[in-house]
Image (spheres, helix red, strand yellow):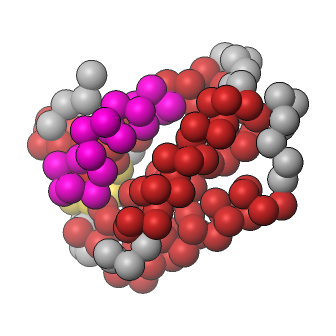
C-alpha cells in the first residue's frame, strides 16, 4: 500500500535538496537508453526474463526519479518514487498499482532468488514503453 508522498518525507525516505536539472536530464536519458537496449539487443526468453525484468524496472525507476531530481528531492525508497509520480500525474493509479507489484517482484528477484517469467518481463516492458513515451518530453 502506497502512502502519500508527504509521509515518505516525514519518514525521511526522501530528502529535500536543491533541484538538479542536469541530474534529472541524465536520469531520463539513461532510462530511455536502457529501455531501448533491453528491447532491441536482448531476446526475451524464460532464461533471460528475470534479468530483463530487473533492468526494465530500473529503467522506469530512473525516468520517474528524474522528476524528483528536477523538483529537488533525493529518494531512498522506490515506494516514494511511485507515490511522487502518482501525485504529480506522471503515472495513473493503475500504473502505480502495477509498478508497486513489479517493485515487490523485482526485490524478490534481486534478493530472494525468485524468478520473473517471460510474461511478467513482457508486461513490464509494455508498461515501461507507455510511461517513458509519455514522459520523455515532459521534463
Query: Residue 83 lies in what quarter of the image?
Result: top left
Classify 14 as above or below 97: below
Seen at 73% across and 56% down, the residue is: 38
The answer to which of 76 and 2 lies nearer the viewer is 2
Task: Find out whether residue 55 is within the magenta segment.
Answer: no
Query: Residue 134 lies in what quarter of the image?
Result: bottom left
Task: Find out whether residue 100 is within the magenta segment.
Answer: yes
The answer to which of 64 and 117 lies nearer the viewer is 117
Q: Quadrant of the C terminus?
A: bottom left
Left or right: residue 37 versus residue 132 is right
Q: Does any portion of residue 23 appear in the rendered image?
A: no
Seen at 87% across and 30% down, the residue is: 47
Seen at 65% across and 39% down, the residue is: 122
Classify 8 as above or below 137: above
Classify 121 as above or below 114: below
Residues drawn in magenta: 86-103
- Residue 45: horizontal and vertical position, in percent? 84, 35
- Residue 49: horizontal and vertical position, in percent? 76, 34
Query: Residue 120 lies in what quarter of the image?
Result: top right
- Residue 121: horizontal and vertical position, in percent? 66, 36
Label the magenta part by its dominant secondary structure: helix
Q: Quadrant of the N terminus?
A: top left
The answer to which of 127 and 100 lies nearer the viewer is 127
Amino acid at each position: 500500500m502506497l502512502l502519500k508522498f508527504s509521509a515518505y518525507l516525514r519518514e525521511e525516505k526522501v530528502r529535500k535538496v536543491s533541484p538538479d536539472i542536469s541530474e534529472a536530464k541524465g536520469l531520463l536519458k539513461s532510462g530511455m537508453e536502457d529501455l531501448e537496449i533491453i528491447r532491441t539487443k536482448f531476446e526475451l526468453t524464460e532464461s533471460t526474463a528475470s534479468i530483463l525484468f530487473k533492468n526494465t524496472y530500473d529503467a522506469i525507476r530512473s525516468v520517474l526519479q528524474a522528476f524528483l531530481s528536477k523538483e529537488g528531492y533525493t529518494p531512498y525508497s522506490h515506494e516514494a518514487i511511485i507515490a511522487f509520480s502518482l501525485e504529480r500525474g506522471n503515472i495513473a493509479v493503475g500504473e502505480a498499482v502495477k509498478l508497486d507489484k513489479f517493485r515487490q517482484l523485482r526485490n524478490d528477484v534481486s534478493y530472494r532468488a525468485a524468478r520473473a517469467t517471460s510474461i511478467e518481463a513482457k508486461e513490464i516492458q509494455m508498461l515501461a514503453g507507455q510511461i517513458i513515451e509519455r514522459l520523455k518530453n515532459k521534463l
